[in-house]
Amino acid sequence: MIPIRTNDEIEKIRRAAELVARTLDLVEDMAEPGVTTAALDREAQKFIESEGARPAFLGYRGFPATLCVSIDDEVVHGIPGDRELSVGMIVSVDVGTVIDDYYGDGARTMAVGAVSADAKRLMRVTQDALAAGIRAAIPGNRVGAIGAAVSAVAEAAGVGVVRALTGHGIGAQMHEPPQIPNFGSPKEGEQIEAGMVFAIEPMLNQGDHEVDFGSDGWTVRTKDGSLSAHFEHTVAVRAEGPEILTRVVHVAHG
Ligand code: MG
């Protein structure tokens, strides 16, 4: 069963998800040549804890860090360490937070300095694919419509859709039903209803879709060594349509 959230619950998820967006903004500001991935992780953890929240990935099934940091051909789940960023890298940063027992989850691929035209294009296509997937998250559609929309964008651009990992429901736990594959048919999966909350997260490869699961037990890489990009939003399904929760809410004063 896919949980249906009340408005109060969605507001709690929004707090966690907005903190995810602010954390990604902070990391993006820091992502300059010479910075280690461990330094990004330290600052992200400090920031999340200073906001009265908890990093959701730290300790999850034994994951040792606040951020997943995955560089170039690394797809997801890279462990921060003493590796330094350098010009031309693309860095996928994924982070989850928990506030008052509710979860938010989001990811962005960031360019370090000037990157190749191919890298820029892959990042843009992955964002477009995410946007298409989000637009399909409407009441009346089936969950398969999300993956179908993502893969239509990817296939039109000639890039590979990672099939071994999926998006997911989110709310009172980081991973809840349903699984949200980034491929498939709009006729598949459960009916989408208002009040469902999804983490939609296309992982697209410049080359083939196949991945290897790394020897550190976490890092996932493209099998062919090609670049990979990853964008993710936490999205609430509303009667009127999808609402992105991993977004900084600017409050007007005056
Ligand atoms: Mg996720």
Image (tube, helix red, strand yellow):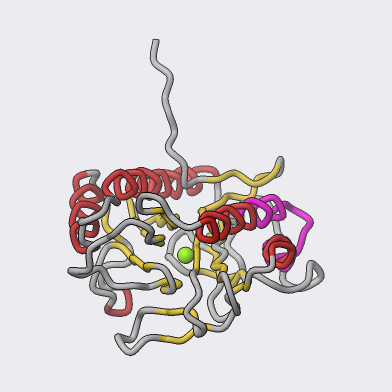
Residue 106 appears anywhere in the view: no
Quadrant showing the N terminus: bottom right
The residue depicted at 74 percent of the width and 53 percent of the height is: 139
- Residue 189 magenta-drawn? no
The residue depicted at 41 percent of the width and 68 percent of the height is: 72
Q: Quadrant of residue 145?
A: bottom right
Determine whether, in the image, residue 205 is placed left or right of residue 189.
left
Which residue range is magenta in the image?
A: 130-150
Determine whether, in the image, residue 82 is placed left or right of residue 175.
left
Residue 70 appears anywhere in the view: yes
Q: Residue 188: percent from the left, percent from the top?
A: 77, 73
State whether the magenta stretch is mostly helix, strand or loop: helix
Quadrant showing the C terminus: top left
The residue depicted at 43 percent of the width and 65 percent of the height is: 174
Is residue 212 shown above or below 134? below
Is residue 234 shown above or below 161? above
The residue depicted at 44 percent of the width and 61 percent of the height is: 172
Is residue 240 shown above or below 178? above
